[in-house]
Image: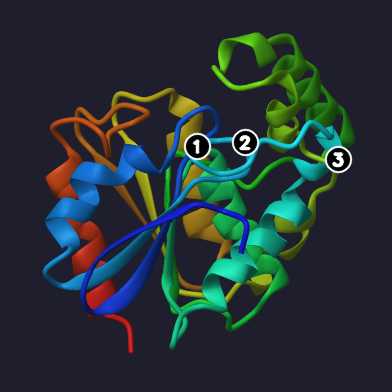
């Protein structure tokens, strides 16, 4: 396993994925609130935190990230709940779309399923490339943010993994729109909008609330 993973707590496993340009540390307040009830594994994606930073941009693709995540999951005794923020949320959706029954459930925060339309996908990629210098990581790492296909959108109605979608009431409106879309299209998805929550609401005064919502969701799963 090449990714750095911060493990803490005891209980059934919850794996957490951060967004582009942050690290496992983004989940510190959430995992502190959970660690008496769950084992939490906060993952540094490739090129972030204490994980390796290869020079080759080809290392930073969705599918390579999912393979790395498989290595993390292989170290567990049972399927986890996978929690992801922003890019991490997209990766959680992609994992559930491409690996049915590998997860106990997923929780996504302020994220979307990508784009079915190739033009919109290219617009996203072009914008990501223009803004690469703003993410605080080496430029090749930002390749991970690019959308190469529409696999999540194409399989959205077949993702049976129980899914909780969290959106911040004060985040950009498109995240609430994405959450509504996921709730409508996925067989077992529910949207919660947190009043006053911003894009990184799991890091601020909403962290405990986010943790308790995750714990409550976990309690509903077998």
Image coordinates of residue 191 in percent, x first then y, are: 36, 53
Q: Nearer the viewer, residue 96 or 37?
A: 37
Residue highlighted by disc 2? 47
The alpha-carbon separation of the residues under discs 3 and 2 comes to 12 Å
Mark 1: which secondary structure?
loop
Residue for point 25% across, 44% down: 28
Image coordinates of residue 155 in percent, x first then y, are: 73, 65
Relative placement, left or right, of 185 versus 196 is right
Mark 2: which secondary structure?
loop
Identify whether 23 is placed above or below 122: below
Residue highlighted by disc 3? 58
Which dot, 2 or 1, sits closer to the camera?
2
Image coordinates of residue 200 in percent, x first then y, are: 34, 31
Q: Quadrant of the C terminus?
A: bottom left
Mark 3: which secondary structure?
helix
Asked if the residues shown at circle 1 and circle 3 are in contact, with their CB atoms under 8 angstroms apart, the answer is no
Relative placement, left or right, of 104 versus 71 is left
Residue for point 64% across, 79% down: 100
């Amino acid at each position: 396993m090449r990714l750095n993973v911060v493990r803490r707590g005891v209980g059934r496993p919850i794996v957490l994925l951060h967004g582009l340009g942050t690290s496992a540390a983004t989940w510190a307040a959430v995992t502190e609130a959970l660690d008496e009830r769950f084992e939490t594994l906060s993952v540094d994606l490739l090129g972030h935190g204490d994980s390796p930073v290869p020079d080759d941009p080809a290392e930073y693709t969705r599918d390579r990230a999912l393979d790395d995540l498989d290595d993390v999951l292989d170290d567990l005794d049972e399927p986890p709940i996978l929690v992801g923020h922003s890019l991490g949320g997209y990766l959680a959706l992609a994992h559930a779309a491409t690996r049915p029954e590998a997860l106990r459930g997923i929780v996504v925060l302020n994220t979307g399923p990508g784009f079915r339309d190739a033009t919109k996908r290219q617009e996203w990629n072009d914008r990501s490339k223009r803004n690469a210098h703003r993410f605080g990581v080496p430029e090749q790492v930002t390749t991970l943010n690019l959308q190469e296909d529409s696999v999540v959108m194409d399989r959205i109605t077949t993702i049976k993994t129980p899914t909780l979608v969290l959106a911040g009431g004060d985040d950009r409106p498109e995240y609430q729109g994405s959450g509504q879309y996921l709730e409508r299209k996925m067989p077992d998805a529910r949207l919660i909008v947190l009043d006053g929550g911003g894009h990184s609401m799991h890091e601020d005064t909403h962290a405990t609330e986010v943790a308790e919502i995750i714990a409550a969701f976990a309690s509903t799963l077998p």
